[in-house]
Amino acid sequence: MAAAMELRCWGGDWGLPSVHNESLVVLAYAKFSGAKVNISPIDWTWKTLTATVPELVCGDTSVKEPSQILNFLRKQRFNADYELSARQGADTMAYIALLEEKLQPALLHTFWLDAENYANLTRPWFASHSPFPLNFLVPSRHANSARSRILLTRGEAPLCRITEVEGKLYSDAKECLNLLSYRLGEANYFFGNLPTSLDAFVFGFVAPLHKAHLRNSPLQSHLRKLENLTRFCDNILADYFSSAQPGLPPSVQETMDANLQKLTQLVNKESNLIEKMDDNLRSSPQHKLHRPQPKPGLVIEKSSTPA
Amino acid sequence: MSLAADAFVSQMAAAEPWPESATLYQPLKEDQILLSECASSLAVQAYLRMCGLPVQVVCKANAEYMSPSGKIPFIHVGNQVVSELGPIVQFTKAKGHSLSEGLDDIQRAEMKAYMELVNNMLLTAELYIQWCDDGTAAEITRPRYSSPYSWPLSTILAYQKQWEVRRKMNAIGWGGKNLEQVYEDVSQCCQALSQRLGTQPFFFNKQPTELDALVFGHLFTILTTRLTSTELAERVRGYGNLLSFCRRIEQTYFEDRTS
């Protein structure tokens, strides 16, 4: 039995279990694979400044970065990709690369660098979830790292400004959303009927864009037009994160119900059979002398009576 | 480049046919070009050959500074200059030459996803090995990169470039990786490409696409470039179908012209 796993991540809001993309990826994967992790939000603690989020602590090992955490969970035999073929595993890697290269930069820009969204939504949220002196520091630190990440990975000339790459950033992200929408089609999940790690990544990246109350976002209005992607997010939220069913995901619940039904049917059949045998025995000549007893109600009692 | 300019360029491009005098610029082949630059340049050359568009390769010591985006390679066609594979694919498409026309929406999504996988993993790994592995940077990368310049400019430019690449690696979370982890990533990427290719001649069966050009550019360059250690090439050599894929594209598109 493995030690208890603790997941440090940003807390939830806007109808989501976490507002942070990478935290959300790990939370979704943990639900899909059935891993039991204790979630400890870093909100209102000094970890808002010091911790790298998300971080999985298990005993004395600590794992950072979503892909590393997912690998760690797989090694602990919490594998949501168990049924995928090698080709589907390759596809998973490719689509995750697509998300990281094309969608993530535009998301960082939408939440952290777009002046209106940053002032009205992102900065107030992260400031109000950080303890007193840090509330002045944490949001701007995130915004700076988002800016340098976009400039270093997408900036063309060394000294170019962010406005020069914005257009390309958003057209790439819209194309990426379109491609995901084509790939998903009318299916519930990307590979068949069970969610896998690719579903966790897509959910983690797309759900905050779907749920956040952004003042100004062409990307959000583009996402609203892709109905199957928004439905995909809503379904995962309802099936895995709704507070009404904190225990088991519905698919497991359903199979359990089905099994219970089968078991009841089997028991009924058997009890009928035993009853018949019992009647036959009673009508056999050596029992003729006994007077007929009233039938006992429970099957178990019957089977325990010596025949 | 802004979107309006993009649209303008593609409109302009559609008006003129592909000229005979198209040129592709890259750094000096013998003394200067680096692994990642050579891979990107070869990918573009393979793409243009697959389209049947003639291009003349010109080596210039200052190619990096001539390029509009600061990246290698770039092509000069008529009165337009376009750099990198993605924009070049769009540019040729505007001129009516496209390899991915026959694909449906899902296949196109898959093609784009695998192209990003190559950029995300192979290209980043090449950059990491070139600039962040101290042995390779000191023995190969910095001397080659600065070969056209005299001291002290050579030292300044080489260290400036190295600093820039290292900042990029830190920003995308590769700063904390060691060489072994990078090789492991390369293996995983090749494994995925090998699975996707299977026994088909090209990634989308009979017809080559820009994905085939990109994969060929990177793998062929990794296989044929001598570095301080052969580990990178060894990792690729483990996948038989990728090797025969490279050989097939080399024979089909490169050998008949040079002979």
Image (cartoon, grey):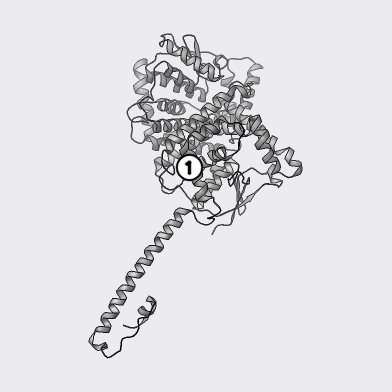
Task: State the quadrant of the N terminus of chain A.
Answer: bottom right
Q: Nearer the viewer, residue A74 or B235?
A: A74
Q: Residues within 10 Å of mark 1 (few under 14, many from 20)?
A: many
Residue A200: image x %, image y %?
A: 51, 44
Residue B9: image x %, image y %?
A: 49, 14
Badge 1 element: helix
In which image quadrant can residue A66 be found? Answer: top right
Q: Nearer the viewer, residue A282 or B206?
A: A282
Would you say residue B233 is visible in this rendering?
Answer: no
Residue projecting furthest to the bottom: A289
Residue projecting furthest to the left: A285
**Mark 1, chain letter?**
A
Q: Nearer the viewer, residue A289 or B6?
A: A289
Question: Circle 1 sits on which residue?
Answer: A232
Residue A270: image x %, image y %?
A: 33, 71
Against B59, is B252 above or below?
below
Could you tell me the amino acid type at mark 1? Phe
In which image quadrant can residue B20 be found? Answer: top left
How many numbered marks appear?
1
Against B48, is A303 above or below?
below
Residue B43: image x %, image y %?
A: 44, 23
Please give the name of the residue rendered at 76% of the width and 43% of the height, measured from the top-left corner.
Answer: A132
Residue projecting furthest to the right: A133
Would you say residue B167 is visible in this rendering?
Answer: yes
Task: State the quadrant of the C terminus of chain A.
Answer: bottom left
Q: Nearer the viewer, residue B175 or B97?
A: B97
Q: Is residue B119 left or right of residue B164?
A: left
